[in-house]
Amino acid sequence: MSPQPALIRALQNPARYDHPVTAVTVLETHISWVLLTGDWAYKIKKPVDLGFVDFSTLDRRRFFCMEELRLNRRLAPHLYRDVVAIGGTAQAPVLNGGGEPFEYAVRMRQFPQDRLLDRLLARDAVSRTQIERIAAVVADFHGTIERASPKQPCGDPEQVHRPVRENFLQIEPLLPDAAGRERLAALREWGDEEYRRHRATFRAR
């Protein structure tokens, strides 16, 4: 059995951190837990292999923690701090100590949750100027990326559609009933139709 559920429970104790913590809030996705501690947020990857991500071993989770840090620092260096090794035991974890690590976490500077884009949009608190500013940052960033060779297939329409098809193949075994599989089949059919409709646009791009 994975030690992670016990680890997440233990890390909800403020005394487990090497900095002042009043309370811990846990956010969960299908591939990770994020622990909000006030000044810092810690993201721990789940030991899952969903096809499109494989975090099934400790070495892979460490590797992808380091990759997340490296990639996201390019646009948000002020948020992404480091990768923390977790030693000790799942019941009594020690951050950056406790001997041989049994887990890793990406440590990020925590920001107020009411600044998430979906919450700002819900309050109508996002201006056109802000969106244009974000778009300019992303466009400038794309301009710094090395261009692919014309011989590389990464922009080919088939390459665009392949991960969409893979999603359906990876999701289908996880569905518990016929109703879910029927909905997935309808969604797959819609996706294929949209691909055919936009294929020329993908190629032109």
Image (cartoon, rainbow, N blue to C red):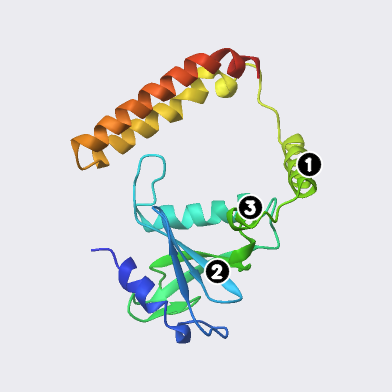
Look at label 3 and name its amino acid: Leu
- Alpha carbon of mark 2 to alpha carbon of mark 3: how far? 23 Å
Residue 121: mark: 3
Quadrant where the image shows the C terminus:
top right
Looking at the picture, how far across and down is residue 106, in whole percent?
53, 63
Residue 154 in view in this figure: yes
Mark 3 vs mark 1, foreground winner is: 3
N-term mark: 1 or 2: 2
N-term mark: 3 or 1: 3
Q: Residue 20 is drawn in which quadrant? A: bottom right
- Residue at image position (55%, 17%) is 198
Mark 1 vs mark 2, foreground winner is: 1
Quadrant where the image shows the N terminus:
bottom left
Look at label 1 and name its amino acid: Ala
- Residue at image position (37%, 22%) is 189
Looking at the picture, how far across and down is residue 47, in whole percent?
35, 56
Viewer-nearest residue: 205 or 100? 205
**193 is higher (above) or lower (below) than 56:** above
Disc 3 packing (10 Å; few <14; some 14–19; many ≥20): few
Q: Which residue is mark 2?
A: 41
- Alpha carbon of mark 3 to alpha carbon of mark 1: how far? 19 Å
Looking at the picture, how far across and down is residue 163, in whole percent?
45, 30
Viewer-nearest residue: 101 or 196? 196
N-term mark: 2 or 3: 2
**180 is higher (above) or lower (below) than 58:** above
Looking at the picture, how far across and down is residue 38, in whole percent?
58, 77
Q: Which residue is mark 1?
A: 136
- Alpha carbon of mark 1 to alpha carbon of mark 2: how far? 28 Å
Residue at the left extreme, as displayed: 177
- Say which element carries label 3: helix
Disc 2 packing (10 Å; few <14; some 14–19; many ≥20): many
